Image: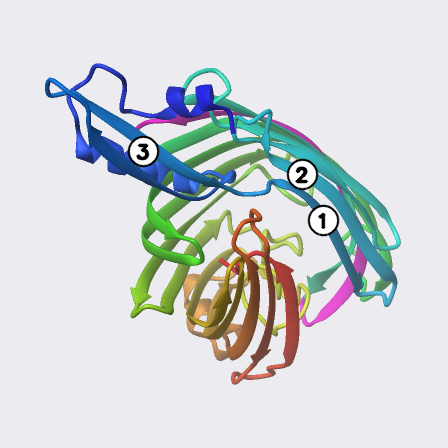
């Protein structure tokens, strides 16, 4: 990390009155950066009421390869490889890309520079060409489609103050649905190509504090999207959701973590509903995209406990409960209380953590459903689930 970048980012400047609140905010901000594993400050008296302030930074290794191997829904052997630098040029810029093959070719390139222009103003540019096999739900049956999404996105990033920031921009994308197998409906096409524009707005309030694998505090992320989609099967629509996070340290080795999501979208009676019920997004153990809805209530709560810690390595165990419910496409809010739409999955898991490599947390969770028509399953991933 470049010293000039840290000096520009810091609120404390040479010649100013000594301010412990500003120093604490600088340290908290530094610990949120991908390139920083831990940070703290020291103050030493110099002479004539002058002081030397030291910011001590333990850096993360941030050039991260990504390799995933799994079996896709169609039993196809699948893999994903990528390379990202989360501290590109020593300026907290995330830059990299991936290639994926799950029977279909996909790739993406991402450039995110929160402080590209000033210590408050940045830019994000993203391109993705994604193809996968996904189910669409028609009444009480399902059909498998090849889904393709080709998108270009530009976002402006602005930090209002220490705790609050916004992102605003445009995304142009083309979606393609191509029928493979399963149920059919005369009103649902077997091939559909849609060109769409999306206005994206994100507001984030971040009051989290980090100490290596431990997190404490509160965070809120609000997402709003307006999508133009003039066609016979999907009108222009709005979608918004808010994620609330609450973390609390429990003793020396425990951490209680919570995420609550409320999401709602235009309530079109369409199989192309935007909220999905999925292992990797909201309910561990439920399966890969088992249902869709036009509104969602999801609560994830878990207790994380450090079982073993030595130098850079941490073994962490967790016990969790994931619960969610959805509004059916074209339905009403009473769908939330319909037992057929509810999913409750308790479970346990393990985390293998490298303290000095950014996001180097390998997780494995087992979720077991206790509601109507429930399943169970193992979920692997990189990074904490939330």
User: So how many labels did they put on this image?
Assistant: 3
Q: Quadrant of residue 277?
A: bottom right
Q: Position of 200 compared to 103: left or right?
A: left
State how far apart marks 1 and 2 are (Cα). 8 Å
Task: From this view, report whether residue 206 is shown above or below residue 305.
Answer: above
Question: Is residue 141 in the magenta section?
Answer: yes
- From the top left corner, tell me how far across and down residue 284 is, in percent: 57, 70
Q: Earlier in the sequence, mark 1 or mark 2?
A: 1
Q: At which x and y percent is residue 207?
A: 31, 45
Query: Is disc 3 in contact with disc 2, using a CB cutoff of under 8 Å?
Result: no
Task: Please rate how many residues cluster around mark 2, counting C-alpha atoms within 10 Å: few if below 14, some from 14 to 19, many from 20.
Answer: some
Q: Find numbered disc 3 in the image and state the secondary structure of the residue it sits on.
A: helix
Q: CA distance from mark 1 to mark 3?
A: 31 Å
Magenta region includes residue 22? no
Judged by its main secondary structure, the magenta piece is strand
Q: Which is closer to the viewer, label 3 or label 2?
A: 3
**What stretch of residues is rendered in magenta?**
139-161
Asked if one can make out residue 353 in the rendered structure from this viewpoint, the answer is: yes
Regarding residue 175, the answer to whether it shows in the image is: no
Q: What residue is shown with label 3?
A: 26
């Amino acid at each position: 990390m470049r010293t000039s970048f840290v000096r520009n980012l810091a609120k404390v400047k040479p010649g100013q009155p000594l301010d412990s609140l500003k120093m604490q905010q600088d340290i908290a901000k530094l610990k949120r950066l991908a390139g920083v594993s831990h940070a703290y400050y020291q103050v030493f008296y110099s002479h004539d009421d002058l002081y030397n302030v030291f910011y001590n930074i333990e850096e993360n290794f941030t050039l991260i390869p990504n390799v995933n191997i799994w079996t896709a829904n169609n039993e196809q052997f699948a893999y994903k490889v990528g390379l990202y630098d989360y501290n590109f040029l020593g300026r907290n810029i995330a830059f990299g890309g991936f290639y994926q093959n799950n029977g279909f070719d996909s790739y993406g390139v991402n450039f995110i520079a929160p402080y590209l222009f000033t210590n408050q103003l940045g830019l994000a540019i993203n391109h993705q060409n994604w193809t996968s096999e996904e189910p669409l739900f028609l009444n009480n049956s399902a059909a498998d489609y090849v889904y393709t999404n080709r998108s270009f996105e530009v976002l402006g990033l602005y930090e209002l103050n220490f705790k609050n920031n916004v992102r605003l921009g445009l995304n142009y994308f083309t979606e393609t649905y191509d029928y493979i197998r399963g149920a059919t409906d005369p009103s649902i096409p077997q091939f559909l190509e849609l060109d769409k524009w999306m206005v994206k707005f994100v507001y984030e309030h971040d009051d989290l504090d980090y100490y290596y694998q431990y997190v404490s505090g509160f965070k809120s992320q609000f997402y709003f999207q307006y999508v133009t989609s003039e066609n016979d099967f999907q009108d222009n629509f709005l979608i918004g959701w808010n994620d609330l996070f609450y973390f609390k340290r429990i003793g020396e080795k425990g951490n209680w973590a919570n995420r609550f999501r409320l999401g709602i979208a235009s309530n079109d009676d369409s199989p192309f509903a935007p909220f999905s019920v999925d292992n990797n997004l909201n309910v561990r153990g439920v399966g890969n995209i088992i249902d869709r809805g036009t509104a969602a209530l999801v609560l994830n709560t878990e207790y994380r406990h450090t079982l073993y810690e030595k130098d850079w390595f941490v073994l962490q165990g967790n016990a969790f409960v994931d619960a969610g419910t959805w509004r059916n496409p074209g339905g009403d809010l009473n769908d939330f209380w319909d037992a057929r739409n509810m999913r409750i999955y308790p479970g346990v898991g393990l985390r293998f953590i490298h303290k000095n490599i950014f996001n180097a947390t390998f997780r494995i969770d087992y979720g077991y459903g206790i509601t109507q028509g429930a399943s169970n399953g193992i979920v692997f991933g990189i990074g904490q689930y939330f």
